[in-house]
Image: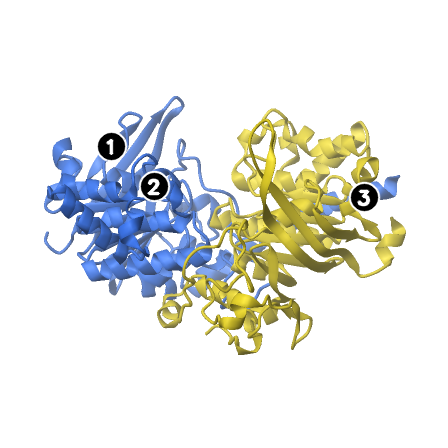
Chain colours: A blue, B yellow
Amino acid sequence: MGEYLLEVQDLKTYFKVKAGKVRAVDGVSFAIKPGEKLGVVGESGCGKSVTALSIMRLLPQPPAEMAGGSVLFDDQDLLDVPESTMRKIRGGKIGMIFQDPMTCLNPTMTVGKQIGEALRIHLKVSKDEAQKRAISLLEQVGIPAAAERINSYPHQFSGGMRQRVMIAIALACNPKLLIADEPTTALDVTVQAQILELINGVCSDFGTAVMIITHDLGVVAGMTDRVVVMYAGKVMETAPTDELFANPRHPYTLGLLSSVPRLDEVRHSQLRTIEGAPPDLLKPPPGCPFMPRCAFARAICRTMPPLEALPGNSAHFKACWVDVTDPQEQAYAEKRRQTRIEKVLAATNAQLASTQPVSEEK
Amino acid sequence: MAETLVASKTLVDVRDLKMHFPLTQGILFQRVIGYIRAVDGVTFSIERGQTMGLVGESGSGKTTIGRTIVRLYKPTAGQIMFGDEDLASMGGEELRRARQRVQMIFQDPFASLNPRYTIGSLIAEPMHIYKVASGAEIRDRTTELLSVVGLRPEYIDRYPHEFSGGQRQRIAVARALSINPEFVIADEPVSALDVSIRAQVLNLLQRLQQQFNLTYLFVSHDLSVVRHVADRIAVMYLGKIVELSDRDELYAAPKHPYTKALLSAIPIPDPQIEKHRKRIILSGDLPSPINIPSGCRFHTRCPMAQEICREVEPVYEAKEGREHYAACHFSEFVTPVD
């Protein structure tokens, strides 16, 4: 211990529904060092938000069920501590920002009061002191005329401004860790740039560690030290950011990186796609959950590969049996991809051949 | 129909289109207290078989343009020339007939498909309305459409809730194509979809464009997606087009500071590039379309704004380069994004 601020080990969060158990998070492990910025990337339904909510113990049980694992923070297992301790940690030692700033703020309270609330509960400061600190926090998050704006209500702010207020609340008690769950997804690109720069700057100033959850690989590339790639409730790959983008080793990461159109690259006429859709987590396929969509897949993939460090690189972990850098494996995957595309094309062409455009029939 | 196919290259020609929504006060005796100028004088044209990308932040009026072209709204002023017909001034039966040639795909496939209809009847509905086919013919055509968009024909009797987001968007595409439109307006067709599914739908739209010689108006806030699909791109800000140009030129040599700021705000999935990029961070938010700033409407956030920008509205005119239009006093000083 000591090296890591937060250590999540084999976390399992299931949801009980009528039809069975949804394995939303199914054995997730990662760690964050003090002051480190960690990105968690994945598609919707991959369990990234549920991971964050499990760390904060914000999921109602039932339907949620913490089926296993541990979340070590400050030498305590957050899954074991009493609720009263948890209340001190939430907003005190761990701050959180949510996706939608429109619904996270209380519409009946002024923003000054909402920021002050965190200060008064956790730091037990006086009303005047809370007010003073609220003003300086609002200034730090870049809200002009902060002394007047603390008396405004959330509806008087725009989306970007509200997200700034959320950041001020989350950072009010100088937490050691900030969890940001899709903090810019509801915002426009120009405002997104402002908010990301703000989170980056403020957290570096305060020395706060950040766990940023996003589906946007661009966001992760710009501001994190390490990235965790999740798929269907499992960690597929984790590596330092530079390493992950330069040297992706999991077929899913490869697929994600090549399926987004990029501004800085030569335009291709066709995007490479990952065929198919994520699995149903009620009935996850046996073995690697990415297998049904994976061009590299083979028989051994029916057993889930362990998340292991690459030989010779103890910082880069992947959960895959295949060495995707092997030219033979690549040729095999390319061939499988081609036959799949040809199959689809042949099917549509056969249909098209029999298609008579309606206008000509008339 | 055969004549219009060979006639001019331009399919859609929008001229000085305005769409103002009245703001009213009072319940019984409503009076107009102002206007939301959602679209405030927009001119552009699209050639047959091409894709025009329409980009802007939320509130810039890009969706309103799309909806006005299909005449979900009656425009305040301007013309929407479709061939030699003006959609803006049409009504009744005439409009209904003209609309057969224009179809729309909406952003949210969870909201745009009626949950009580099977997907077969959803796709067939436009064919019934326009009487392009009947009976068994409709069913045949529906199964064909399903396989054209990459869904299994056996799914025909299933309901929308049985499909994922990407599959639903395919159904919406099939529905739009069922009556052989010439022009398709796609309003943020992939924004609600996951990254790995987005590419599938984008590729589908491109393949269909080639197969059926479709013309697209592709509305999106995502410049990297638009770059991938569009031939020409118009950038909107507060109800006006601030820049319009050929795709590659817009990205290589933007002529409007807003375009440049948008381009530089997009994160690139490469940490090496991200570390060395100089970002232009625009201050503040989009002003309200009720009180549009004087002079150039971008001057309140523009890093290059001068005295003149506050007072004189810049003319939207051709700048150097091929068919490159911009509305900025200082467009020659806008440098490429590094």
Could you tell me if residue A298 is visible in this image?
Answer: yes
Looking at the image, do the residues carrying marks 3 and 2 touch, with CB atoms under 8 Å apart? no
Q: Which element is circle 3 on? A: loop
Q: Which element is circle 1 on? A: strand
Relative depth, front residue between B327 and B137: B327
Q: Chain of mark 1?
A: A
Looking at the image, the residue that sits furthest to the top is A18
Q: Which residue is mark 1?
A: A67
Q: Chain of mark 3?
A: A
Q: Earlier in the sequence, mark 3 or mark 2?
A: 2
Residue B48, percent across and down? 76, 58
Q: Residues within 10 Å of mark 1 (few under 14, many from 20)?
A: some
Q: Which residue is mark 2?
A: A153
Locate the C terminus of chain B by quadrant: bottom left
Q: Earlier in the sequence, mark 3 or mark 1?
A: 1
Q: Chain of mark 2?
A: A
Could you tell me if residue A232 is visible in this image?
Answer: no
Relative depth, front residue between B136 and A351: B136
Q: Amino acid at mark 2?
A: Tyr
Q: Quadrant of residue A121?
A: top left
Q: Quadrant of residue B241?
A: bottom right
Q: Amino acid at mark 1?
A: Ala
Circles 1 and 2 on the same chain: yes
Q: Which residue is mark 3?
A: A357
